[in-house]
Image (cartoon, rainbow, N blue to C red):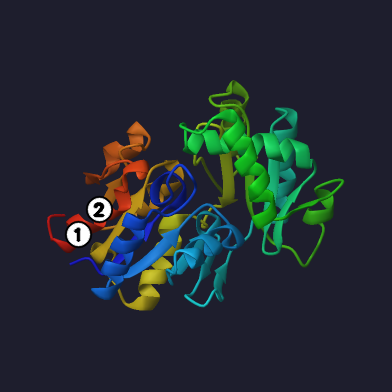
Amino acid sequence: MIQLIASDMDGTLLNSEMEISEANITAIKKAQAAGIEFVVATGRSIEEAKPILDAAKISCRFITSNGAQIFDKNGENNFTLGIDKDKLTQIIPVLREHKIYFELFTNNGGFTENIDSRLASVAHWLKSTSPNLSEAEALATAKSHMTTLPIHQVNNFNEVVENSELKVLKVFAMGQRHDPALALAKQELNNIAGLHVTSSGANNIEVNHIDAHKGASLKKMTDKLGIAMQDVAALGDNFNDVSMLQAAGLSIAMANGEAAVKQIAKQVTVANTQNGVAHAIDNILEKKW
């Protein structure tokens, strides 16, 4: 019997307008009323994720930055696992060598060396998660995104790496969709021991500590709650969701998800633009899944 539902955000819980649909909100609240714990498991930071759930009036726990942090329903941090400094000094040169734009996300916000490059890259990222967006709409959303998640600009990332008060939770690199440079850089990063390297879209690379992934943090959370992983349902659409889909008793992929992700899932729901989370929750509550 499902006691906890964990959902990714981009390409899963959120629609093409980067919002939670009314149908998804209703279904989540119905599940919570039935005593099922609802958890957001996202590559986003807590600063990016929580306001969207607050706007929908949904109170829940969060797994953020691909598993690098865990937060309770009050937004209190319960767990943080950053990337070791010696690993960062290996990651950064690889991305610079391939001329790939990247950012550092920390326990105190995100950092960039170039705001204009960030706007262009976020617009490309939005297009990868919501292909129906036009270039102009994606850029407008990217600019709006800057107001909801201020990114600090630094002259050089060494200012972040050398700051003892900051923990780098995730390195997020973005480029053009299916850019060969991304594939080459990802291959090189995979050769660095102690890292978890994945993607949440065809135009990005996400790098975390090897033990900071959604599956591991979901297990930490369920252990604390006394819930067996067999009684967990997980929903996702991309490669950074694979670890939790593999860990959950019921794995559910989105119809808009990557083909390889759908192949490992036990069930496939409809697309994120068609209220796929609500469709999955209804099937769970009706005990069809």
> Label 1: which residue?
284
Residue kind at label 1, given as amino acid type: Ile
Q: Is residue 42 left or right of residue 263?
A: right
Contact (Cβ within 8 Å) of mark 1 with mark 2: yes
Image quadrant for the N terminus?
bottom left
Residue kind at label 2, given as amino acid type: Ala
Name the residue at the top extreme. Answer: 180
Alpha carbon separation for disc pair 1 and 2:
6 Å
Relative image position of residue 41 (x, y in whole percent): 44, 58
> Label 2: which residue?
280
In the rendered image of this protein, does residue 14 appear above or below residue 218?
Answer: above
Q: Quick check: can you spot residue 194?
A: no
Instruction: Classify 10 Å Cα crowding around label 2: few (below 14), some (14-19), many (20 and above).
Output: many
> Image point 38% across, 43% down: which residue?
237
Q: Quick check: can you spot residue 117?
A: yes
Relative image position of residue 203 (x, y in whole percent): 56, 32
* Element at label 2: helix
Dividing the picture into quadrants, the one containing residue 143 is top right
Relative image position of residue 131 (x, y in whole percent): 47, 32
> Image point 50% across, 32% down: which residue?
202
Considering depth in this image, is 55 or 166 the residue closer to the camera? 55
Instruction: Classify 10 Å Cα crowding around label 1: few (below 14), some (14-19), many (20 and above).
Output: some
Considering depth in this image, is 25 or 12 the residue closer to the camera? 25
Q: Is residue 24 left or right of residue 89?
A: left
Q: Is residue 124 left or right of residue 119?
A: left
